[in-house]
Image: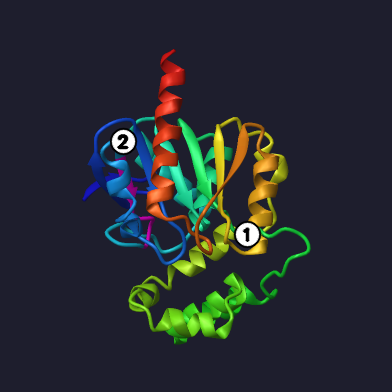
């Protein structure tokens, strides 16, 4: 993997694949760049893909203390390597990070986000003590911390969690459990930053699956409505996920149409 150095000196690793207009990929909770292993082949024939490990994940470094600003600087460093006209595609908590970067004025050629997990009024929120309870569990029982996050923050019922635990990704999820504390800080109180989003001029495509949770669907709709240059697209998919064969062509079209418009 190739590497860049972020603003605080942390090394951020990325995998570069393909040829064409640049696109930067960043994932959400529990994920490093390998989360995009099935999407990259859909993009690489058309785009230069920069899939990176967020700090504390994969081959990227970390720092003693987490801050959202440091993660924004990480993304900015990868965009600088890709080219400031790079489109960013971000998933889940990564979508909140990408929106934070856009609101901070980080240069980018466009933004596609999949279901940022903001919380809209009328839907269940994590308990007030969530962050502290998660911190204690991370110190004493990493597997329990993952279960707690899935139940309390994501809203999984017990049978879904048991299915997840029996799946092939569970050990990798537990290995990255420490980054759940980072995502908890990033997501904050869950409120959509409507006033800050209203100042964002980046062209943004909000994507949601037609089979996602009601609270994620409501968040996607409200976030898209708050963006002056935002629009929403619903695609066939699963809970909180759109398959690569569906998502890939949408991203290629967004990136190439954007370049054609600028060249005209």
Taking depth in this image into account, of 30 and 141 the one nearest to the observer is: 30
168 part of magenta stretch: no
Disc 2: which residue: 47
Q: Residue furthest top?
A: 264
Q: Is 109 rendered above or below residue 34?
A: above
- Rendering coords of residue 222 (x, y %): 70, 48
**Which residue corresponds to the image point at 67% horizontal and 62% vertical from the top-left?**
215
Q: Nearer the viewer, residue 230 or 99?
A: 230
Quarter containing the C terminus = top left
Picture quarter containing residue 130? Answer: bottom right
Element type at mark 1 = helix
Image point (57%, 54%), residue name: 116
x, y percentage for residue 236?
52, 54
Image height of 262 relative to 123, above or below? above
Secondary element at tag 2? loop
Judging by the rendered image, the residue that carries numbered circle 1 is 216
Q: Does 54 lie within the magenta span?
A: yes
Q: Is residue 251 left or right of residue 20?
A: right
């Amino acid at each position: 993997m190739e590497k860049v150095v972020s603003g605080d000196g942390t090394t951020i690793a990325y995998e570069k694949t393909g040829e064409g207009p640049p696109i930067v990929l960043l994932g959400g909770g529990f994920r490093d760049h390998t989360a995009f292993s099935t999407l990259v082949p859909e993009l690489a024939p058309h785009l230069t893909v920069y899939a990176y490990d967020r700090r504390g994940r994969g081959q990227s470094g970390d720092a003693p203390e987490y801050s959202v600003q440091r993660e924004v600087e990480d993304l900015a460093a990868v965009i600088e390597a890709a080219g400031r006209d790079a489109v960013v595609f971000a998933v889940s908590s990564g979508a909140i990070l990408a929106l934070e970067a856009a609101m901070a004025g980080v240069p980018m050629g466009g933004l596609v986000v999949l279901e940022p997990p903001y919380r809209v009024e009328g839907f269940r929120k994590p308990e007030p003590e969530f962050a502290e309870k998660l911190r204690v569990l991370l110190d004493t029982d990493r597997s329990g911390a993952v279960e707690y996050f899935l139940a309390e923050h994501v809203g999984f019922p017990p049978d879904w969690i048991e299915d997840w635990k029996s799946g092939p990704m569970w050990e990798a999820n537990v290995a990255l459990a420490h980054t759940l504390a980072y995502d908890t800080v990033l997501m904050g109180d869950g409120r959509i930053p409507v006033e800050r989003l209203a100042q964002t001029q980046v062209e943004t495509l909000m994507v949601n699956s037609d089979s996602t949770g009601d609270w994620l669907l409501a968040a996607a709709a409200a976030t898209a409505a708050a963006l002056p240059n935002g629009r929403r697209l619903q695609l066939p998919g699963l809970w909180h996920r759109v398959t690569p064969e569906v998502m890939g062509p949408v991203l290629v079209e967004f990136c190439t149409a954007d370049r054609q418009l600028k060249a005209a």
